[in-house]
Amino acid sequence: MYKISKQFAFSASHILEGLSGDHPCSRMHGHNYIITVHLKSAELNEVGFVKDYRELSFIKKYIDDVLDHRHLNDIFDVNPTAENIARKLYEIFVKQAPQIYAVEVSETPKTTAIYEADGK
């Protein structure tokens, strides 16, 4: 199995619902997010790629147009935790790149949430 990944970055704010009022994440705050998409394939294409990284430009466009410098509560129909963001981005991106098997969301250099599709 061949695996590749590519990172993308954006900055955005959010408020996490359901937390106690004294929890800092219950207030509006922001992160410099790093999104990593993970792709895999048992076979390489005719060039020798799982997928040409340039073919992932649609991800950068989505991030720049929809997520960057936005309030994520206005974008997603779920509480914008890193875990939920990872799942939502997977669902959006896999439609154009079926080799994607996981999306990783990092809000800080020390934290990461990963959504990985079952059975892929």
Image: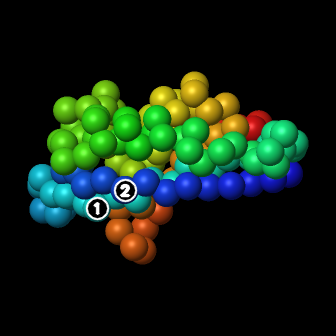
Quadrant where the image shows the C terminus: top right
Can you identify the residue that label 1 sits on?
Answer: 32
Q: Depth check: 57 or 33 in front?
A: 57
Viewed as shown, does residue 33 lie left or right of 50?
Answer: left
x, y percentage for residue 98? 67, 31
At 31% from the left and 53% from the top, the residue drawn is 10
Front position among marks 2 and 1: 2
Q: Amino acid at mark 2?
A: Ala
Q: Does residue 91 appear in this view?
A: yes
Q: Residue 111 lies in what quarter of the image?
A: bottom left
Disc 2 and disc 1 in contact, CB within 8 angstroms: yes
Q: Which mark is residue 9?
A: 2
46 in relation to 113, above or below: above
Query: Judging from the image, what secondary structure is the residue with disc 1 in?
Result: strand
In the image, 7: left or right of 17?
right
Residue 58 in the image: state x and y as whole percent.
46, 35
Q: Is residue 87 visible?
A: no
Q: Position of residue 66 (x, y in %)?
A: 28, 35
Disc assigned to residue 103: none
Amino acid type, residue under disc 1 in the picture: Asn
Residue 50 in the image: x percent, y percent? 75, 45
Q: How many marks?
A: 2
The answer to which of 65 and 87 lies nearer the viewer is 65
The crowd level at tag 1 (other Cα within 10 Å; few <14, some 14-19, many 20+) is some
Q: Is residue 55 above or below residue 2?
A: above
